[in-house]
């Protein structure tokens, strides 16, 4: 069987690459240069241009009029919308060429909306979603939804919004509720209210499931900033937003929830091996965190793929 029998290319397409996977379709007026590596079952639509130092994984969709320049890597199951503009030179000048082009990486399952622009050297994380027309100037974390120019994080894909006030018990009593994310519980803390004001408290083995070796506070966070984006190997944490409001995304590798911490009497217990993101801080927000261990940079898992691997295989 010849190479051409394994994939389809429209008669008007120019295909000089010899590394095209089975079942791939290359439509009219595409141009695929020698050296480009294209996986199986891809769909490369009208007018797309792919340079030689480009790798495209399996099941990738590239809609009309997309150019993939040298240095771009696209992993499996990525969707690239029509007219998406990739770039590989931050300060282009006519007839001046870089010795080496920055590497742009679009990770597994990510989608890029129509006419978005991706600056050179950007990494777009697993399952991220780039909105139509966004201008992506910074790396996009796994599962993030970004929009605008410059693109900012507006949310996370596939999160179930956890409304805490729908299931907590009446005020002034303590309650603890499991969530759909393994190892994450939401606590409604007790509160003593009287004419002098209010007092909320947490006590080990009642409202606090671990002994505290460390506490820290996060505050003065500019509204568009996103913190966290990591998991811990051994650390238990308990989060209380003691002023303002912050959204917390929690992910056990299978399910994701988003909780808005906007009341003093609300706490979240986060067990080890939970991917956590904190964002949408209000200007006045103060996040108080109790931690079961002293600070240890080696306890962090910062790469989402590593996190999924550890959750699945234990290492
Ligand atoms: C988490 C979320 C909720 C220390 O030196 N000691 C500490 O106890 C902590 C927490 C941090 N640091 C240093 C390490 C970094 O140089 O403070 C700097 C900022 O920390 P990081 O970038 O980790 O901040 P966040 O907001 O991304 O994450 C923090 C916690 O580190 C993390 O465990 O779950 O808050």
Image (tube, helix red, strand yellow):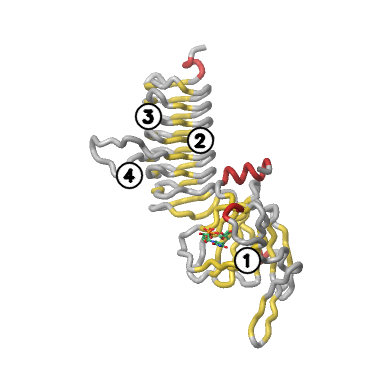
Give the alpha-carbon distance from disc 1 to disc 4, as whole Å: 43 Å
Q: Residue 75, labelled with which disc?
A: 2
Q: Are marks 4 and 2 in contact (CB under 8 Å)?
A: no
- Vertically, is 243 above or below 303? below
Identify the secondary structure beneath mark 2.
loop
Give the alpha-carbon distance from disc 2 to disc 1, as whole Å: 40 Å
Instruction: Name the one closer to the observer, 153 or 55.
Output: 55
Quarter of the image where the C terminus is located: top right
- Vertically, is 30 above or below 285? above
Instruction: Name the one closer to the observer, 93 or 31.
Output: 93
Q: Which residue is mark 1?
A: 214
Quadrant position of residue 175: bottom right
Give the alpha-carbon distance from disc 4 to disc 2, as whole Å: 23 Å
Q: Which residue is mark 4?
A: 90
- Mark 2 against mark 1, which lies toward the viewer? 1
Of label 2 and label 1, which has the lower sequence position? 2
Report x, y in % for residue 112.
Answer: 46, 42
Of label 4 and label 2, which has the lower sequence position? 2
Quarter of the picture for ligand 1? bottom right
- Vertically, is 163 above or below 305? below
């Amino acid at each position: 069987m010849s190479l051409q029998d394994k994939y389809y290319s429209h008669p008007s397409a120019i295909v000089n690459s010899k590394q095209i996977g089975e079942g791939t379709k290359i439509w009219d007026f595409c141009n695929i240069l020698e050296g480009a590596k294209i996986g199986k079952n891809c769909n490369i639509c009208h007018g797309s241009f792919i340079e030689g130092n480009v790798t495209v994984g399996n099941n990738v969709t590239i809609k009309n009029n997309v150019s993939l320049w040298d240095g771009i890597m696209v992993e499996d199951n990525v969707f690239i919308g029509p007219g998406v503009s990739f770039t590989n030179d931050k300060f282009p000048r006519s007839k001046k060429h870089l010795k080496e082009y920055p590497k742009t990486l679009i990770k597994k399952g990510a989608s890029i909306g129509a006419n978005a622009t991706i600056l050179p050297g950007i990494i777009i994380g697993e399952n991220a979603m780039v909105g139509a027309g966004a201008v992506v100037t910074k790396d996009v974390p796994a599962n993030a939804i970004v929009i605008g120019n410059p693109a900012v994080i507006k949310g996370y894909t596939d999160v179930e919004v956890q409304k805490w006030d729908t299931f907590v018990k009446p005020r002034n009593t303590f309650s603890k509720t499991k969530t759909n994310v393994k190892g994450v519980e939401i606590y409604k803390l007790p509160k003593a209210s009287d004419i002098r004001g209010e007092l909320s408290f947490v006590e080990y083995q009642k409202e606090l499931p671990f002994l505290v070796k460390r506490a820290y506070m996060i505050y003065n966070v500019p509204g568009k900033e996103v913190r966290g984006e990591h998991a811990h190997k051994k650390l238990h944490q308990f989060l209380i937003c003691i002023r303002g409001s912050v959204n917390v995304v929690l992910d056990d590798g299978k399910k994701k929830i988003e909780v808005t911490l906007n009341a003093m009497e609300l706490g979240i217990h986060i067990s080890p091996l939970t991917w956590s993101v904190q964002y949408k801080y209000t200007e006045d927000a103060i996040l108080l965190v109790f931690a079961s261990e002293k600070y240890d940079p080696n306890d962090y898992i910062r790469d989402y793929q590593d996190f999924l691997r550890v959750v699945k295989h234990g290492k």
